[in-house]
Amino acid sequence: MDAQSWWVQGVDVTKPSPARVYDVHLGGSHNFQVDRDLAEKAAALMPSLPTVLRANRSFLRRVVRHLAGRGVRQFLDLGSGIPTVGNVHEIAQQANPQCRVVYVDSDLVAVAHSHAILRGNDRAIAVRADFRDADYVLGHREVRSMLDFDEPIAVLFFAVLHFVPDDDDPIGIVSRYVRSLPSGSYLAISHACSDDITESTRQAAQLYSERIGGFHMRPKRQIAAMFSDVELVEPGLVDLTEWRPDSHEVPPGGKPWTGPGGVGRKK
Ligand SMILES: C[S@@+](CC[C@H](N)C(=O)[O-])C[C@H]1O[C@@H](n2cnc3c(N)ncnc32)[C@H](O)[C@@H]1O
């Protein structure tokens, strides 16, 4: 896809965006110089950052595959990002073509590119919204027409809740979504963790926070509290690479510390 086909009117090319900086780290091409500059500075402080973000994508793929394998047919992906290799609808619909997926993101480029790749797919849509406004997302006409709230839904918060400040009550936001789902639904979260981080990782997080307007690493106990309305499935809230890994091989240089992720089931 060339630059013209995803460039969207209204995008501020002077300010880095979380979606586009993440795209840089994943080796994507939907980003601007301002995003590449921030990604480079952050990776200089935290050289494992691109590996950590790839571990997050790999966690996402394993979770969706696992849930589709357990019969989940509906996915609500909040803060879905710029589509890259192995998106939720691709994994879910590969497991079962009947799976339906709603992507929600506030970023113009993320939503425009999602619309472009979803053309012709009548079981997946992308909606531009701020997921903190759960009532808006849950009441959105397109969301309601794609997802049946009487059937189990997996609500996915992959690498997004650390953009939500404490004042906006991230635990309450998660709870609002989970409460709207029927029993047998699932919640999946990955979240940057502030436990045991090095000084240079703290500096990388601070740089992100200053440039993109808020990045909130949290202790694992606060991330665990986001699962209070569900029952964690095995192996619980663990380092992303430890969550049902495809292989137990240790990559050259050792496993990076990635922060926790988990999946819970609503009883
Ligand atoms: C690091 S990316 C993660 C993308 C994807 N979930 C993944 O794990 O690969 C974070 C995404 O969350 C989106 N985001 C952050 N805060 C948001 C909000 N309040 N509402 C909607 N999207 C948000 C950003 O635009 C960005 O696309």
Image (cartoon, helix red, strand yellow):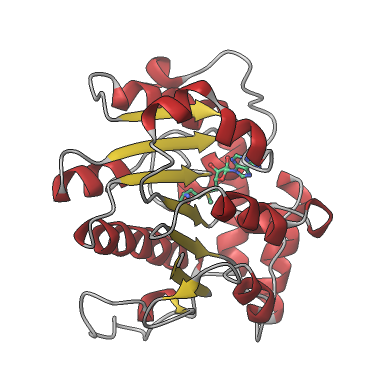
Q: In which quarter of the image is the C terminus?
A: bottom left
Name the residue: 55% across, 47% down: 180
Residue 103: quarter of image = top left
On the picture, is 95 further left or further right than 144? left
Residue 149: quarter of image = top left
Rendering coords of residue 41 (x, y %)? 62, 56
Rendering coords of residue 235 (x, y %)? 38, 83
Name the residue: 29% across, 81% down: 251
Q: Quadrant of the N terminus?
A: top left
In the figure, 232 relative to 95: above or below?
below
Rendering coords of residue 124 (x, y %)? 32, 31
Name the residue: 54% across, 36% down: 105
**Rendering quadrant holding ligand 1:** top right
Q: Does the rendering let one see residue 1?
A: no
Residue 224: quarter of image = bottom right
In the figure, 198 relative to 1: above or below?
below
Camera-nearest residue between 7 and 101? 101
On the picture, is 170 further left or further right than 109? right
Residue with the most extreme right position: 167
Q: Does the rendering let one see residue 151?
A: yes
Camera-nearest residue between 258 and 2? 258
Rendering coords of residue 188 (x, y %)? 46, 62
